[in-house]
Image (cartoon, rainbow, N blue to C red):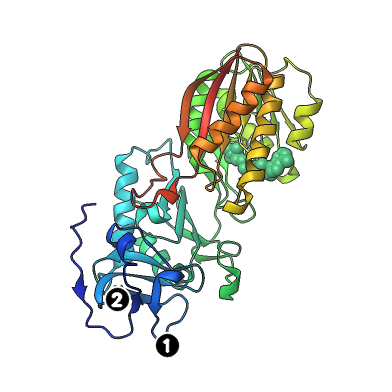
C-alpha cells in the first residue's frame, strides 16, 4: 500500500485527543501507538473503544484510531485524516487478503494462514487466522472488540475467501480492566469440521479449546525447512503442541520422531495429527512430560535433530533476564545431549527478547558445552505475519538452525 507523505491538517472536529508539544514525532513517522504520557487533553465524553482523532498541540490532525485506557491510549488506524473511510475494515481486509494471495499461501494444498497480523496489516489490535472456510478472530483492544460484528461481516464479503464461519476468541486477549467480559462465540456460522491443510499436510485445528487461535501458523515455513533436514534422522520435537514439526519430520523421512509436551491435551492433539497423516506409523511416539525433565533424563546421543520451540519465556520487558536464563538452560541441555553432526532448530517467540539477545543466550549455551556449533539458517516469522517498518515491535519470532559437531 502506498502512503502519501503526511501533511497535517487543522482539525475541524471538537473532541479530539490533543498531544503535548513535541509528542507528535512518532506519529509523523507512522508509528501507530499513542502513549498516555504524550497526551495533553482528552475529550470529556471519551469512552474505551471509541474512534478518536488525534491532533498535535496546535490542533493539526495526525490520525484517527481506537482509544483505550492504559499505557497505549490510542492505536492509530489511519494517519493524516480525521474520519475513517467508508467500509474501512472491508478495505483493509481486502488488502490483507490480496497480499496473502500474492504470497502464494492460498492454494488447494494450503488453506490455513494468518490473514490479519495486527499492526503489520495496519489493523492494530486485531488478529485473524484462516482455517479453510473458518476465520478465527482475536481482539486485543476494546476498539476491535466493539467493531467485531462489522469485521466478521466484512470477512464474509471477501470476494474469493468463501468464509462461512467466524469464531470470535477474545476471552483472554482483551485488557482485563476494560471490563468488557467478551465471550468466545461464533459471530457467523458455526462449527462444521475443523481440518485444515498446510503444505499438503492435514491438521485438526481446535480453535474452541486450543491455544491462541488453535494452531501456530507462524511456524509453517520453519516446519517446511525442518522437513528437508529430516531424512535419516532421529527427531525430537520439544514443546510439540499440535505436533506440527513432527508431522513434517515424518513426511521428510525421519527414522523416528518423538514429540514432547507437558500438556496431555497437546500430546493428544499431536497423536491425532500424526494419525491423520501417517496412520499406524510406528516411527512416532508422544510423551506428555516436562521438557526440562525429559532432556535431563534422556540418554545422550539419542537424537540427531532436535526442535526447541518453547512458549514465550519473557512475556514482558521485566521478564527478560529470567527469560534469557531459561533459553540458555534449555539450549545448554540440547547441546549437551545432541548427537555429533546433529541439527538443532531453536526458537524464541518472546517479543521482549531481541534477535541479538536470543542469539547471545544460545551462543553462551554453545560455548559452555564445548561443542563446535555453526549457524546454518536464521529464521523468523513468515510473510503472513508482516512487520510494519514503522512498528518494529511487530517482530517476535526468531530461530536458529545449528549444526552441532
Ligand atoms: N511447536 C509448537 C508450538 C509450541 S507452543 C508448534 O509448532 O505448533 C508451546 C508448547 O509448550 C505448548 O503446547 C505448551 O503446552 C508446551 N509447554 C509449556 N511448558 C512446557 C514444559 N515445561 N515442558 C513441555 N512442554 C511445555
In the picture provided, is 266 more to the left or to the right than 168? Answer: right
What percent of the width, then of the height, locates residue 252? 54, 20
Q: Is residue 224 visible?
A: yes
Foreground residue among 330 and 119: 330
Outermost residue on the front side: it is 21
For disc 1, the marked residue is 45
In the picture provided, is 336 more to the left or to the right than 72? Answer: right
Q: Gap between marks 2 and 1, in whole Å? A: 19 Å
User: To which quarter of the image does residue 183 belong?
Assistant: bottom right
What percent of the width, then of the height, locates residue 224? 48, 28
What percent of the width, then of the height, locates residue 58? 25, 77
Residue at 55% from the left image edge and 48% from the top image edge: 194
Placement of the C terminus among the 4 image quadrants:
top right
In the picture provided, is 235 more to the left or to the right than 95? Answer: right
Mark 1 close to ligand 1, CB under 8 Å? no
Mark 2 close to ligand 1, CB under 8 Å? no
- Tag 1's secondary structure? loop
Residue at 19% from the left image edge and 73% from the top image edge: 9
For disc 2, the marked residue is 57
Amino acid at each position: 500500500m502506498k502512503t502519501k507523505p503526511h501533511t497535517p491538517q487543522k482539525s475541524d472536529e471538537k473532541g479530539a485527543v490533543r498531544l503535548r508539544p513535541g509528542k507528535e514525532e512518532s506519529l509523523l513517522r507512522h508509528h501507530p501507538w499513542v502513549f498516555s504520557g504524550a497526551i495533553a487533553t482528552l475529550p470529556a465524553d471519551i469512552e474505551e473503544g471509541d474512534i478518536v482523532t488525534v491532533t498535535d498541540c496546535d490542533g493539526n490532525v495526525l490520525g484517527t484510531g481506537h482509544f483505550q485506557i492504559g499505557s497505549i491510549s490510542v492505536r492509530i488506524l489511519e494517519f493524516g485524516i480525521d474520519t475513517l473511510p467508508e467500509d474501512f475494515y472491508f478495505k483493509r481486509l481486502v488488502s490483507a487478503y490480496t497480499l496473502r494471495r500474492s504470497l502464494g499461501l492460498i492454494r488447494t494444498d494450503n488453506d490455513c494462514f494468518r490473514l490479519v497480523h495486527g499492526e503489520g496489516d495496519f489493523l492494530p489490535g486485531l488478529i485473524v487466522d484462516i482455517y479453510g472456510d473458518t476465520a478465527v478472530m482475536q481482539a486485543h483492544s476494546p476498539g476491535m472488540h466493539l467493531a467485531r460484528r462489522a469485521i466478521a461481516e466484512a470477512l464474509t464479503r471477501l470476494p474469493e475467501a468463501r468464509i462461512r464461519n467466524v469464531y470470535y476468541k477474545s476471552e483472554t486477549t482483551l485488557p482485563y480492566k476494560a471490563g468488557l467480559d467478551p465471550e468466545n462465540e461464533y459471530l457467523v456460522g458455526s462449527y462444521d469440521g475443523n481440518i485444515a491443510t498446510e503444505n499438503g499436510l492435514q491438521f485438526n485445528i481446535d480453535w474452541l479449546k486450543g491455544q491462541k487461535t488453535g494452531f501456530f501458523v507462524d511456524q509453517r515455513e520453519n516446519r517446511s525447512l525442518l522437513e528437508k533436514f529430516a531424512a535419516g534422522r532421529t527427531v525430537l520435537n520439544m514443546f510439540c503442541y499440535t505436533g506440527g514439526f513432527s508431522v513434517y519430520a515424518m513426511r521428510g523421512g525421519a527414522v523416528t520422531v518423538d514429540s514432547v509436551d507437558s500438556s496431555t491435551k497437546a500430546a493428544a492433539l499431536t497423536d491425532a495429527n500424526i494419525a491423520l497423516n501417517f496412520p499406524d506409523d510406528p516411527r512416532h511416539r508422544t510423551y506428555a512430560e516436562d521438557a526440562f525433565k525429559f532432556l535431563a533424563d534422556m540418554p545422550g546421543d539419542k537424537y540427531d535433530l532436535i526442535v526447541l520451540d518453547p512458549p514465550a519465556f519473557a512475556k514482558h520487558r521485566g521478564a527478560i533476564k529470567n527469560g534469557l536464563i531459561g533459553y540458555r538452560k534449555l539450549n545448554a541441555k540440547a547441546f549437551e545431549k545432541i548427537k555429533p553432526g546433529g541439527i538443532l532448530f531453536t526458537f524464541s517467540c518472546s517479543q521482549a527478547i531481541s534477535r541479538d539477545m536470543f542469539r547471545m543466550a544460545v551462543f553462551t549455551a554453545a560455548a559452555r558445552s564445548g561443542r563446535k556449533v555453526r549457524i546454518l539458517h536464521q529464521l523468523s516469522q513468515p510473510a503472513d505475519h508482516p512487520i510494519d517498518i514503522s512498528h518494529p515491535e511487530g517482530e517476535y519470532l526468531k530461530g536458529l538452525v545449528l549444526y552441532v559437531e
